[in-house]
């Protein structure tokens, strides 16, 4: 008898991860289309990027008595041209990772537009807030997979390579240019609300990609470092790493305690340090994510 062959575990894992990522891209693209069709486009809000430019072009052409240019088709054409540039910037892997988000978002934008209701009742503030939240959540799901929906980011990467400005600055500048172009087509008021939506999209996107669980990092410099480290281990049940640092003013070497904590552990840590050494130096900063023992499992 021929022995049964099973798919190797790594191959199964990759296949499951691919299926999960494609599912997230599909859901995220659909959410993005809902935000655009229900809140943004019908109310004259063009929140930057290729989609915002497509919304502006469609409205301008219709106002001039021209044909109806679907927003999804426009984004697909624009992104197809940008993919030629992306091939040179990021190579074939970058292009392939982007294709699913580009195609699905364009299809969902045009396919869902006839069946989705226009929400917000013309209240531009309400539309910019909800449109920003829904579109940002959709894009965040796509970005969590390592993919994207194309757009002006590709141009910004090229500009950053040939100028002293970073990519993030170019993204803001290009999005603001798209919003500014929408002002003569819609109104200055619409452009201002579109700017609110643009920044909200970016903020929600970051929250979805990074996760709502923002851990904290604490650095403690104290002469009572042994007692503080023991209390952290026993009372907080957290790992503690001791580093060696040297003060430039005194030239003395001192241990520095490095601790990763959850939000709920901050107040107990402060109490521990205050009891054992009120003169200790404590610096607490935010870490978007923490993986490993005691935290989430690190997945490829």
Image: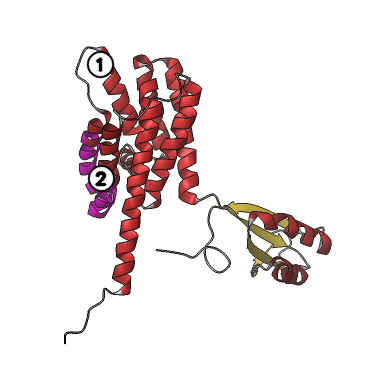
Q: Quadrant of residue 157?
A: top left
Q: Does the segment drawn in magenta span residue 282?
A: no
Which x, y percent locates residue 224?
A: 78, 68
The residue lying furthest to the bottom in this view is 1
* Residue located beneath label 2 in the image: 86
- Can residue 69 be seen here? The reply is yes
Q: Residues within 10 Å of mark 2 (few under 14, many from 20)?
A: many
Residue 217 against residue 13 in the figure, above or below: above
What residue is rendered at 29% in x and 69% in y?
11
Do residues under tags 1 and 2 come within 8 Å of each other at their CB atoms? no
The reply, left or right, for residue 153 in relation to residue 261 is left
Which x, y percent locates residue 180?
A: 39, 22
Which x, y percent locates residue 75?
A: 26, 34
Which x, y percent locates residue 278?
A: 82, 58
Quote the CA–CA distance across marks 1 and 2.
Answer: 31 Å
Number of residue marks:
2
Q: Residues within 10 Å of mark 1 (few under 14, many from 20)?
A: few
The reply, left or right, for residue 246 in relation to residue 228 is left
* Chain part drawn in magenta: 77-100
The reply, left or right, for residue 103 in relation to residue 275 is left
* Residue located beneath label 1 in the image: 62
């Amino acid at each position: 008898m021929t022995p049964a062959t099973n798919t190797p575990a790594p191959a199964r894992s990759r296949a499951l991860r691919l299926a999960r990522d494609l599912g997230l891209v599909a859901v995220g693209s659909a959410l993005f289309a809902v935000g655009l069709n229900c809140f943004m486009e019908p109310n004259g809000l063009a929140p930057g990027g290729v989609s915002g430019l497509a919304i502006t072009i469609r409205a301008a052409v219709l106002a001039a008595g021209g044909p109806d240019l679907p927003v999804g088709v426009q984004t697909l054409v624009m992104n197809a041209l940008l993919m030629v540039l992306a091939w040179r910037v990021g190579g074939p892997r970058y292009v392939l990772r982007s294709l699913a988000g580009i195609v699905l978002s364009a299809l969902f934008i045009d396919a869902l537009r006839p069946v989705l209701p226009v929400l917000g009742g013309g209240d531009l503030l309400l539309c910019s807030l909800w449109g920003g939240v829904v579109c940002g959540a959709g894009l965040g799901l796509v970005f969590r997979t390592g993919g994207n929906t194309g757009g002006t980011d590709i141009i910004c990467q090229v500009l950053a390579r040939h100028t002293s400005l970073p990519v993030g600055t170019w993204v803001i500048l290009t999005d603001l240019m798209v919003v500014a172009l929408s002002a003569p087509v819609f109104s200055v008021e619409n452009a201002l609300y579109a700017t609110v939506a643009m920044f909200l999209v970016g903020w929600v996107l970051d929250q979805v990609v990074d996760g709502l669980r923002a851990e904290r990092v604490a650095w403690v410099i104290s002469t009572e470092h042994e007692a503080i480290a023991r209390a952290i281990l026993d009372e907080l049940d957290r790992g503690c790493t001791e580093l060696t640092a040297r003060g430039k003013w005194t030239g003395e070497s001192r241990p520095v305690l490095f601790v990763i904590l959850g939000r709920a552990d901050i107040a107990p840590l402060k109490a521990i340090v205050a009891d054992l050494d009120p003169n200790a130096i404590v610096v607490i900063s935010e870490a978007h994510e923490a993986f490993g023992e005691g935290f989430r499992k690190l997945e490829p």
